[in-house]
Amino acid sequence: MPSPDNAAFLITAVLLLIAAAVLLCTALQRAHTRRLYRTLNRMLDSALDGRLRAETFDESLHSALENRFHDYLTASETSADRIREERARIREIISDISHQTKTPISNILLYTELLSEQELSDAGREYVRALTTQTVKLRFLIESLVKMSRLESEVFLLEPRMAPLAPMFDRLHAQFALPAERKGLSLVFEPTALSAVFDEKWTTEAVGNLLDNAVKYTERGSVTVSAVSYEMFCCIRITDTGMGIPEEELPRIFSRFHRSPDVHDEEGLGIGLYLSREIVSREDGYIKVSSTPGAGSVFSVYLPTDRR
C-alpha cells in the first residue's frame, strides 16, 4: 500500500496531467477556431473581389462548415451576376422605350396642333381635342412607367446634399399656381429659410406628386405648403381642404398602381405616391399622412438634416 506521500504525489501528477490535457485541448480548439475564422475571412475577401474558387476540404466539422459557406458564397455571387445582367437588360429596354416613343408622340401632338388650325367642323374639332388629350395621357403614362422602372432597377442614383428648401418651393409654386387658380383654390407656400439633405431634382418630383394630388382632389378651399424644423429632420407639410382619405385606405395608398374606389373617375395611374415614398426613403427620409374624410389631408415629408 503506497505511503501518504506517494499517494499525494500520484494525485498531484494526475491532476497536472488532466490540467495539461485541458490546456492542450483548449489550445487546439482555439487554433481550429482561428483557422476557421481565417478561412472564412479569406473566402469573404475572395468573394468580394470576384475571385472565389473551389478548394478541397476534408470531412471534419469545421471543413464541412467551410464547404457549406463556400457553396453559399458561390450561389450569392451567381445571383449577384444575374441581377447585374437583368439590370443591364432593363436599362436597355428603358432606353429603347424612351427613344422609340418620344418622337412618334411628339409628332402626333404636332400634327394635331396643325390640324386644329385648319377649317374643321365642330365634330372635327372635338375629335382633335380628344386625340390631343389621349396623346398627352399616353406620354404621361410612358414617362411615369419609365421613371418607376429606373427607380426600381436602380438605373439612376440619388445624390442628396445639403440645400435650402426655398428654391424647390419656388419651382413647385410656378408649376402648380395655374392649375390651382383654374380650380379657384388658394395655393399658399409659406416662406422658409430651412435646409435639408436631399436630391433637388428627384425630391422636387416626390413633393410635386403629393402637391399634384392635393390640387387634383381639392374642389374648394386651399392647399398650403410649409416647412418645420425638428432635431434630426426637416418636415415639408402639404395641407389641403379636399375630400380626405378613408381610414381603411391609408395603409394602401403608397402601394404601386393602387387607386381608391373614390377616385377611379379621376385621371391617374396610381404610382405617384409610390414613387414619392421610394424617392424619399432612398434619401433616408420618410412620409407620414393624416386625413379626415371630407375635411382634407396632411402629407408630411421628413428629410434628414445631417449627412449620414
Image (cartoon, grey):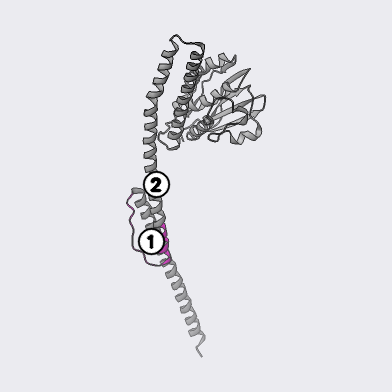
Mark before the other along the chain sequence, 2 or 1: 1
Q: Nearer the viewer, residue 27 or 281?
A: 281
Residue 239 position, x and y percent, is 60, 23
Q: Which of 4 and 139 is in front in this view?
A: 139
Q: Nearer the viewer, residue 212 or 259?
A: 259
Image mark for residue 35: 1
Badge count = 2
* Residue 199 can be seen in this image: no
Residue 56 position, x and y percent, is 34, 63
Q: Is residue 28 above or below residue 201?
A: below
Q: Is residue 125 above or below residue 19?
A: above
Q: What residue would you read off at disc 2?
A: 80
Image mark for residue 282: none
* Residue 51 can be seen in this image: yes
Q: Is 200 situated left or right of 54 in this image?
A: right
Q: Is residue 102 above or below residue 283?
A: above
SS at badge 1: helix
Q: Is 114 situated left or right of 235 in this image?
A: left
Q: Which residue is drawn at 39% across and 40% down?
A: 87
Residue 291 position, x and y percent, is 64, 28
Residue 49 position, x and y percent, is 33, 48
Q: Which residue is drawn at 37% across and 32% down?
A: 96
Q: What residue type is labelled 1?
A: Arg
Tell me where the magenta segment starts and ends, as one range.
50-69
The reply to whether the magenta stretch includes residue 217 is: no
The reply to whether the magenta stretch includes residue 51 is: yes
Q: How far apart are marks 2 and 1 (CA)?
A: 28 Å
